[in-house]
Every structure is written in structure tokens, then in C-alpha cells.
């Protein structure tokens, strides 16, 4: 990804918001188990407290990361319809003439075959290209080529219906 704020799809936003809520809940539960620092226990108690503090620190870091990402996505606005980028919906035509649509994002939903990550083979190949461009990528069965038909609208059969090596 570039250093500029990048848009995200509604699906990716929803996934990040759910993760954020889960992390906050987990953090609150862990924080509630911390003992009053005025009470000192044995070394095992102190070690357990340090472990919990480390877990809370990792949760806080991820909460901050997601919060920042969501804020940046708001600043970036909607995905471009001129060039494939983060959050783009891209209709492609495969070499056999079949068509499908993918959503380029930073997170992919396991049960959504249209979602591919920006760092997957097809995601990397599509980024920065425009309608009419043909791109090649490494697929599970070898190199594959697709032509970008359109951006920002769904077309074809919806889901790709094939294994594009999304790297989810």
C-alpha cells in the first residue's frame, strides 16, 4: 500500500469494526482482572500481572491500528473508478471469455469468494490498472491473464467462480 489514505469496501469496514469491538471487549475483560497495585502477592502473582499487562498492551496497539485505519479510510473517500485501488470493485474477463467481479481490499472474508486482498497475486496484478488493461498473475494452475472490463460496478456472474489464488 502507499502512504496515502486508502479507501476500503463496506465489507472490509464491517470486518474491521467487528474486530475492533471484539478487541475492546477482550481488553476490558483483561483489564478487569488486574489486581490493585497496592496489594503485592508472590512472584507468581506478579508474573501473571506482567503477562496480563503485556496482553493488554498488544490489544491496545491493535485497537489503535484499526481506529487509525478506519479514520484514514474516511479521509480517503470512495474508491476510484478510474484506476484499480484499495476498495475497488473490478469486473474482469478471463482468457476463456468468462467474467467475474472481485473486490480489492486489505482483508478478505473467508466465505466471500469475490473478496481478494491487495497483496494477493491477482490483487497485486490489478492495482494501478484501468479498464481495458490486461494483467497476468500467478494462479494455482500457473500464470493466468485477465482483462479489466470495468471498475466500480458489478458485472459478469458476480463471484469469480474459480480459484484465482487470492492469498486470503
Image (cartoon, rainbow, N blue to C red):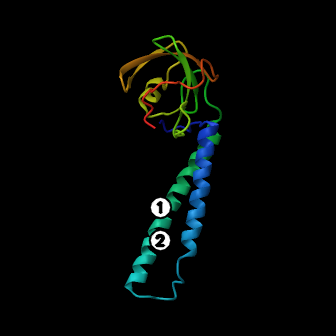
The residue that appears at 40% across and 88% down in the rendered structure is 42
Please indicate whether residue 1 sits to the left or right of residue 152 in the image.
Answer: left
Vertical position of residue 39 compared to residue 125: above or below? below
Please indicate whether residue 92 sits to the left or right of residue 142 in the image.
Answer: right
Vertical position of residue 114 compared to residue 97: above or below? below
Element carrying mark 2: helix
**Foreground: 90 or 112?**
112
- Residue 1 position in % (x across, y down): 47, 36
Q: Residue 13 carries which label?
A: none
Q: In which quarter of the image is residue 114?
A: top right
Please indicate whether residue 34 sits to the left or right of residue 145 in the image.
Answer: right
Looking at the rendered structure, the number of numbered marks drawn on it comes to: 2
Within-10-Å neighbours for mark 1: few <14, some 14–19, many 20+ = few
Residue on which the image places disc 2? 53
- Residue 143 position in % (x across, y down): 36, 20
- Residue 50 position in % (x across, y down): 43, 74
Residue on which the image places disc 1? 58
The reply to whether the C-beta atoms of the residues labelled 1 and 2 are less than 8 Å apart is no
The residue that appears at 44% across and 26% down in the rendered structure is 164
Element carrying mark 1: helix
**Foreground: 151 or 113?**
113
Within-10-Å neighbours for mark 2: few <14, some 14–19, many 20+ = some
Residue that protrudes farthest toward the left in the picture: 142
Amino acid at each position: 500500500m502507499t502512504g496515502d489514505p486508502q479507501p476500503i469496501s463496506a465489507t472490509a469496514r464491517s470486518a474491521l469494526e467487528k474486530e475492533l469491538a471484539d478487541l475492546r471487549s477482550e481488553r476490558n475483560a483483561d483489564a478487569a482482572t488486574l489486581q490493585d497495585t497496592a496489594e503485592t502477592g508472590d512472584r507468581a502473582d506478579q508474573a501473571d500481572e506482567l503477562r496480563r499487562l503485556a496482553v493488554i498492551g498488544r490489544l491496545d496497539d491493535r485497537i489503535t491500528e484499526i481506529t487509525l485505519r478506519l479514520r484514514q479510510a474516511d479521509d480517503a473517500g470512495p474508491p476510484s473508478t478510474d484506476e484499480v485501488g484499495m476498495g475497488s470493485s473490478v469486473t474482469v474477463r478471463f482468457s476463456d471469455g468468462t467474467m467475474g467481479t472481485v473486490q480489492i481490499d486489505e482483508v478478505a472474508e473467508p466465505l466471500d469468494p469475490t473478496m481478494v486482498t491487495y497483496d494477493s497475486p491477482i490483487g497485486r496484478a490489478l492495482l494501478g490498472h484501468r479498464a481495458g488493461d490486461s494483467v497476468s498473475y500467478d494462479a494455482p494452475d500457473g500464470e493466468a491473464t485477465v482483462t479489466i472490463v470495468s471498475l466500480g460496478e458489478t458485472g459478469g456472474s458476480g463471484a469469480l467462480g474459480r480459484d484465482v489464488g487470492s492469498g486470503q
